[in-house]
Image: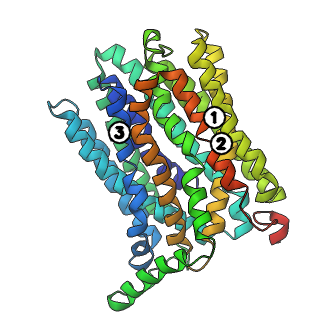
Amino acid sequence: MPSLYYGQGLPYVVVMTLAVVLYKNLGLDNAAIALYTSWLYLPWVIKPLWSPLVDLLRSKRWWIVTLQLVIGAALAAVALTLPTSGFFRLSLAVFWLLAFASATHDIAADGFYMLALPQHQQAAFVGVRSLFYRVAMISGQGGLVYAAGRLTERLGGPVPAWQAVFFGLAAIFGGLFLWHQWRLPRPAADHATTAGGQDLWRGFGETFASFFRRPDIGLVLAFLLLFRLGEAQLVKLVTPFLLDPRAQGGLALSTADVGLVYGTVGVGALTAGGLLGGWVISRHGLMRWLWPMVAAIHLPNLLFVALAAWQPQSLALITAAVACEQFGYGFGFAAYLMFMIWVADGPAKTAHYALCTGFMALGMMLPGMSSGWLQQQMGYAPFFGWVCLCTLPSVWVAAKLRIPADFGRKEAQT
């Protein structure tokens, strides 16, 4: 489980975060970065279109190890594109391939998780699962961003530095491929569910239909799409905000400082919040903690309004504000994860969970696409104020949820 979720988290953070830092270091503006990297969410949005095939064609284990090999090759290909004159177009194309492989890997890994653990252990292990996913984030947007900053100073430019980073990532995935090929368990329930032909397509269609036949499907989709409406815009501009000079409204941190503040301390706080969130849900159930988690994920966004308005120079103060926001986000996101597990529960849980994560990704992609342009029009402080206003729709939707009071509570399942 630790290495599986490390392997799930690392390519996602590469596509969603390292790509932002890479393109910022190579001179692209905020509007272009936000637009094009938000489009990279698309594979996670549309992965439900092929998620039933993961169930129907091969075992989850086969998909996991095969795709880790593909991901390693794609990471090496990114490194090879960077010295070329058309690096942006070429690297973006490879990021698309990486995103599709990573999204499919997510389907298989999440299905493997739900096959291996009963429901109450799924709740208890949400924090553990998040821990190693966050370790991947710390490695990616913390350690690797810090390394890129230091290597840029030593090697005389961002291109050779980022090449070294991506070749290193490719080596990591080569190691994960070999490790999981050798040691990943083989659960008896992990097998293809049909041989193909008409049964395959009938099963494919029924999987989708059963999800959308839910009587509360409108409310489910609203929660999935709106819960992170503010965060979807914030996340694309945090790194540019930390890197931009003070004359442009930013905090003028170095790339290495961003790796330390946002990628290491921030993700550490995010991890701690996620662990605490998973633990309290397993003790008391999701509904008991829903409102504290809604508040925790949204209210700390006000700290970015303050950072943009005052532009403090103290690295310690900036780090504390980022850590507080990330802790609240990690704590609140545990509710979102358990909500998706509740929605997906049933015979087709792998594909239904993929549908949930697809809508989650759509809720991140669409707002993120215009966030760079909005920030350039408004400036950082008003933009972060707008982000805070965008959290209100999720509060309205959360008030309408009717989840069983004991869902996720360990005692209720034993």
- Please tell me how many numbered marks the rendered image carries: 3
136 or 356: nearer the viewer: 356
Q: CA distance from mark 2 to mark 3?
A: 25 Å
Element under disc 3: helix
First in sequence: mark 3 vs mark 1: 3
Name the residue beneath numbered marker 3.
35
Q: Nearer the viewer, mark 2 or mark 3?
A: 3
Name the residue beneath numbered marker 1.
326
Image location (x, y in percent) of residue 79: 26, 36
Query: Within the image, what quadrant is residue 203 found in?
Result: bottom left
First in sequence: mark 2 vs mark 3: 3
Name the residue beneath numbered marker 2.
330
363 or 43: nearer the viewer: 363
Most extreme residue toward the left, as rendered? 85
Element under disc 1: helix
How was this image coloured? rainbow
Instruction: Tell me if residue 401 can be seen.
Output: yes
| Residue drawn at (67%, 22%) of the image | 320
Element under disc 2: helix
129 or 302: nearer the viewer: 302
- Mark 3, other Cα within 10 Å: few <14 / some 14–19 / many ≥20: many
Type of amino acid at the residue the image marks with label 3: Leu
**Picture layout, residue 187 above or below residue 383:** below
- Mark 1, other Cα within 10 Å: few <14 / some 14–19 / many ≥20: many
**Picture layout, residue 274 above or below residue 180:** above
Type of amino acid at the residue the image marks with label 2: Gly
Horizontal side of residue 128 vs 313, given as left or right: right
Quadrant assignment for the N terminus: bottom right
116 or 15: nearer the viewer: 15
Q: Nearer the viewer, mark 3 or mark 1?
A: 3
Badges 1 and 2: C-beta atoms under 8 Å apart? yes
Q: CA distance from mark 1 to mark 2?
A: 6 Å
